[in-house]
Image (cartoon, rainbow, N blue to C red):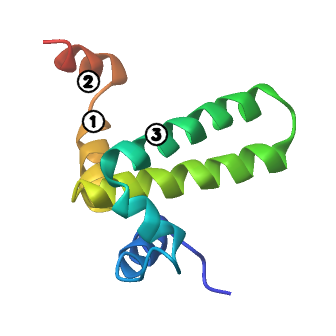
Amino acid sequence: MKRFTLEDLAAVIADRAKATAESSYTKSLLEGGPPRAAKKLGEEAVEVVIAALGTDRAALTAETADLLYHLLVVLHLRDISLQDVLDELGRRTSRSGHEEKASRAH
């Protein structure tokens, strides 16, 4: 079985953006615009935090999958690619975390 990646998920979201809202939850989120998608992202983030405080690995795994999906929907709405985010992470990890954080404080 082919390994599923975040790039695959981003492609699924882009494909489902072409569907109708009646046939695709993704499309209905996109049609709701940033306010609806961002609200769902926030809800999922809270659910990840709650799951992380527990001991149920399956719950944390499932909630994290929901969080990643909703994050990629928000990025799609804002025309930010996964590669843009990865490039930023690469830039940040090229130096120590303390140095990187201090550079953002200005």
Q: Are marks 3 and 1 in contact (CB under 8 Å)?
A: no
From the viewer's side, name the closer residue of 30 and 45. Answer: 30
Quarter-wise, where is residue 96 in the image? top left
* Of pointers 2 and 3, the one earlier in the residue sequence: 3
Q: CA distance from mark 1 to mark 2?
A: 6 Å
* Of pointers 1 and 2, the one earlier in the residue sequence: 1
Could you classify mark 3 by the number of other residues whose Cα lies within 10 Å: few (under 14), some (14-19), or many (20 or more)? few
Decide if residue 40 is on the left or right side of residue 3.
left
Quarter-wise, where is residue 19 in the image? bottom left
Quarter-wise, where is residue 99 in the image? top left
Residue under circle 2? 100
Could you classify mark 1 by the number of other residues whose Cα lies within 10 Å: few (under 14), some (14-19), or many (20 or more)? some
Residue under circle 1? 92
Q: CA distance from mark 2 to mark 3?
A: 29 Å
In the structure shown, which secondary structural element does the residue marked by tag 1 occupy? helix
Quadrant location, the N terminus: bottom right
Q: Are marks 2 and 3 in contact (CB under 8 Å)?
A: no
Q: Residue at x 30, y 50 (%)?
A: 85
Q: Nearer the viewer, mark 2 or mark 3?
A: 3
User: In the rendered structure, which amino acid carries the disc numbered 2?
Assistant: Glu
| Outermost residue to the left | 106
**Where residue 103 sits in the image (x, y, percent)?**
18, 19
In the displayed structure, 85 sits above or below 93; it is: below
Q: Residue at x 37, y 55 (%)?
A: 32
From the viewer's side, name the closer residue of 25 and 61. Answer: 25
**Where residue 79 sits in the image (x, y, percent)?**
21, 59
User: In the rendered structure, which amino acid carries the disc numbered 3?
Assistant: Lys
User: In the rendered structure, which amino acid carries the disc numbered 1?
Assistant: Arg
**Where residue 98 sits in the image (x, y, percent)?**
33, 16
Could you classify mark 2 by the number of other residues whose Cα lies within 10 Å: few (under 14), some (14-19), or many (20 or more)? some
In the displayed structure, 1 sits above or below 6; it is: below
Count of numbered circles in the view:
3
